[in-house]
Each structure stands twice: as C-alpha cells, then as structure tokens.
Amino acid sequence: LLREENGADPWLPRGAEAPKPFYEVFFAKLNDPATRSALWVRFTVWKSEGLVSTGFWCVLFDAPAKQVRVEHWEEPRLPETGSSDPLLRLGAASLGRSSMRAEGPAATWDLSWKPRSQGWDFVPSALRSLGAAKSCYRSALSAGLFEGRLRMGEKHLWFSEAWGSVGHIWGRGMAEDWRWAHAVFPGAGPGDKAVFEILSARARLGPFLTPRMTSANLLFRGKAWESLGLLTVWSNRTREEEGGWSFRADFGDLVAEGFCRPDPAMTAELEYADPAGGELLCRNCGVS
C-alpha cells in the first residue's frame, strides 16, 4: 500500500528507498506528424525479493512499413537517482525533466521535449492519503513537443515537432485489467489545443478484484478539467466493445464520450511480471 502526499513532485523517483517488492516506470510516447508513426519508450526500476534490475523498452509503431517492432533489455542493477536532472542515470542512459536517453544492443534513443501542458493526477488523493492504492500513476507531462532520434537495428528515425507525453507509475504491485488512452488535438491556433487522457483499472484486494475505477483529465479551450473525485471514479465508465472499448467521463460542466479502436495489425503485446508475483499482458497501439 502507498501513502502519497498531495502535491508531491510527479517527476521525483520513488524506487531508491522503497522496500521490496516495488516497481517504477517512466514512459514517454510520441506521434510523428511527418510519418504518422509512433514511439513508446520505458525506463523501469524493479525490486523483488530475489532480484533488482533496470529495464529498457522501446516500441516503434512504424506506419509506413505497417510494422511494430519491440526491443527490450535489462541491467542487473539499479540506477543512480536524484531530485534534479538527471533524475535517473545508468551508464549512458538517463532521464531528466526534459529529456530521456538510452543505448542498448538493438536500440538507441535520444529524446527531448518542450512542455505545452501541465501534468495531472489519476489516483484520487483520498485513496493515496489512506494508503489504499497499491499503485500510483501521474502524468508528469500531459502534452509536449518532442524532438530527437531513434536507432533500431539498421533503421534510423528523426522526430521533430511530435506531440507526446511522459507518464510516471510506481507501486508495490500492478493494477489489473487496465485501459488507458491519451491524445493531443493541436487545433488551428495556440488556444485551440485539446489534450485528453483516461485511465481505467481494477485493484486486487486479496483474492478479490474491485469494481472498475475510471479517472480522466482534459485540457479544453484553455481550461483544465478533472474527473477524479472519489465518487466520480466509480460512476465514470469504460466498456469493452467489438473492436475496442468505449468510455464516458463526467467533468461536471461537460461530459467526454468516445471510442478507442486499436489497429490489430499495429498492436504490440508485451508481457509484464508483477514484482508481487504473477504475469500480465499489455496490448498497446500507438496509432489507434
């Protein structure tokens, strides 16, 4: 169980002092306007009873080639951590508040970003304060413009003016049966940008799974909207449907409704181990 102070720095690493079992993930995702391709990279810290490690994941959704490519490697040690840049460092790999880099046997990336929208929370503060959340998620950067390069084998890509986000997950065990979506709609002018992110999951309490909880955040017409109240997360809805899943999130003065339809041919399937035991399967489509 986690106890998290309200207003804590969403970028601050939590793994160094945490007792086992524990995991922590910083991930960045971006969509390239030139090629319509997408990139998803992850920097993970893992602590279980028999193992500590730092992991790197790189998933390229190559739209012109109609292909998904996944690279993953592990280092059997924990990164150095700090409260200022870099937040995490391990050899040539590093994570800061405006950049993420890694060099692996089959993939190398060097990304930087300029913030264009604040980060936001997805776990109600009451659950964090009571220590009733097994895992926490915060969007450290809800929208930014990314620049950088990627090498995967013989493929070299350069990104410019690509909209994306940075997320931060940490906890003693992963949520189950989760659904997540994020999108940036740039609009015609600076004030027209809309950003939407939604998270829906169930928590395991002993042998039982809780009903589904759904939270969402929206930037619309220059105003930040939050659907995160303790009662709201139970009344918001996501529902599996043929070809994807639908959602409904209540923001008080407005309601957001939609449908997420991944492209099966452009969906990555990743197997995650839970530090508390068990295996999970994640399906992600960066070009839904």
Image (cartoon, rainbow, N blue to C red):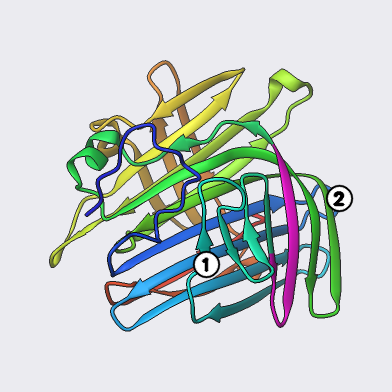
Amino acid, disc 2: Ala
Q: Residue at x 34, y 62 (%)?
A: 174
Residue in view at x 47 percent, y 30 percent: 256
Q: Assess disc 2: are there few (<14), some (14-19) or many (≥20) residues with their C-alpha within 10 Å of its C-alpha.
A: few
- Quadrant that contains the C terminus: bottom right
Q: Which residue is mark 2?
A: 34
Where is residue 195, by image quadrant? top right
Q: Is residue 82 above or below residue 66?
A: above
Q: Residue at x 86, y 69 (%)?
A: 156
Magenta residues, as a range? 102-114
- Expressed as whole percent of the image width and height from the top left, the position of residue 155 reads 84, 74
The location of residue 53, given as percent across then percent down, is 46, 76
Residue 98 magenta: no
Name above or below for residue 128 compared with residue 282.
above
Between residue 144 and residue 37, name the one nearer to us: 144
Horizontally, is 73 left or right of 50 in the view? right
Q: Nearer the viewer, mark 2 or mark 1?
A: 1
| 78, 185: nearer the viewer | 78
